[in-house]
Amino acid sequence: MKQTALITGASSGIGLELAKLFAQNKQNLILVARSTDKLTQLSNDLKSKYGIDVHVLSKDLSNYNAVKEIFDYTKQQNISITHLVNNAGFGDFGFFIESNWAKQEQMINLNITALTYLTHLFLPEMKNNKFGKVLNVASTAAFQPGPTMSVYYATKAYVLHFSEAIANELEGTGITVTALCPGATESGFQTLAAMEESKLVKGKKLPTSEEVAQYGYRAMNKGKKVVIHGVMNYIMANSIRFTPRALVLKVVRAMQDK
Ligand SMILES: NC(=O)c1ccc[n+]([C@@H]2O[C@H](COP(=O)([O-])OP(=O)(O)OC[C@H]3O[C@@H](n4cnc5c(N)ncnc54)[C@H](OP(=O)(O)O)[C@@H]3O)[C@@H](O)[C@H]2O)c1
């Protein structure tokens, strides 16, 4: 079967590196993000290097209609999506009470609604084909509440729980769902989230987007359900289960603060 991956947030960071991995493996691509120039540049590079088909869709996924437009485009072009990578997402650093509402709403629309709607639209076709791989980019933020990034952490908890639940429902259908949980990673994320001064990232040597993408790509191909990148991240995410919640909140707050 001809394989085509739809990747959201392919213009930078982890999504861009994932696009390169699919291309190296001769899988065709639909690249989605808002930055037309960056996507076109990437598309041209990948087409000439690997001889694959690449479609560029410039869409703002925090706009509900954009999701349906993407689905309709694949139908018009007669493209069957075999791999869905819900990667686009962003965070916002600061106290919730002082936050900009429009930004929080945009974050929920992108990190939760677009991811869920895209999955809902593309699963039936995967089920008919008895093959499909969904890779949802969650975060280590998914495992606990996150004071100073409250909405972001909560959106990622949603991504993790939603992914695990549907992975269970889809067992035996040929479709696998993988939740990739990176810790802090070198990308455009920190600047956009205004968290460069947070202790979580300041002065730290972070894993590259390329390393995280390779890890996620392998896990998706193996059909793993939840994968946490990095040994320390794995230990922390799992130790939380045995730690009183009040203490977890204190530790996360201390780690996140400036
Ligand atoms: N970096 C980290 O520390 C880290 C840690 C854990 C999890 N993650 C998760 O990893 C995923 C990828 O982030 P990244 O680190 O690679 O950050 P990034 O470099 O900022 O990339 C984010 C991508 O999302 C796209 N995007 C943002 N808003 C969008 C919108 N409204 N509509 C469509 N596309 C949009 C951006 O493209 P345009 O601006 O061109 O639209 C970009 O391609 C996110 O879900 C993030 O939450 C990141």
Image: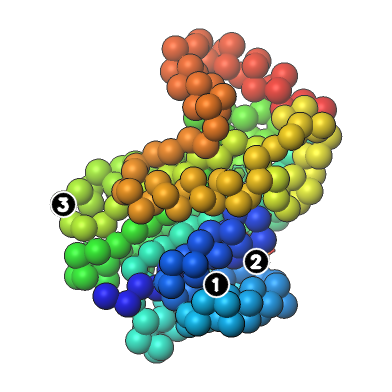
Q: Residue, x 23% and y 52% (percent of image)? A: 170
In the image shown, does 86 or 105 lie closer to the viewer?
86
In x, y percent, where is residue 206?
70, 37
Structural distance between the alpha carbons of marks 3 and 1: 29 Å
Q: Is mark 2 within 8 Å of ligand 1?
A: yes
Residue 172 badge: 3
Which amino acid, mark 2?
Ser
SS at mark 2 in the image: loop
Reading the chain from its start, which is encountered first: label 2 or label 1? 2
User: Which residue in the protein does label 2 denote?
Assistant: 11
Reading the chain from its start, which is encountered first: label 3 or label 2? 2
Residue 70 seen in the figure: no
Structural distance between the alpha carbons of marks 2 and 1: 8 Å
Q: Is mark 1 within 8 Å of ligand 1?
A: no
Q: Tell me where residue 17 sits by quadrant.
A: bottom right
Q: Residue, x 82% and y 31% (percent of image)? A: 203
**CB within 8 Å, label 2 to label 1:** yes
Q: Tell me where residue 96 sits by quadrant.
A: top right
SS at mark 1 in the image: strand
* Figure quadrant of the C terminus: top right
SS at mark 3 in the image: loop
Q: Quadrant of ligand 1?
A: bottom right
Vertical side of 81 occupied by 229: above or below: above
Reading the chain from its start, which is encountered first: label 3 or label 1? 1
Dot 3 surroundings within 10 Å: few (below 14), some, or many (20 or more)?
Answer: few
Residue 138 seen in the figure: yes
Residue 138 badge: none
User: Which residue in the protein does label 1 denote?
Assistant: 31
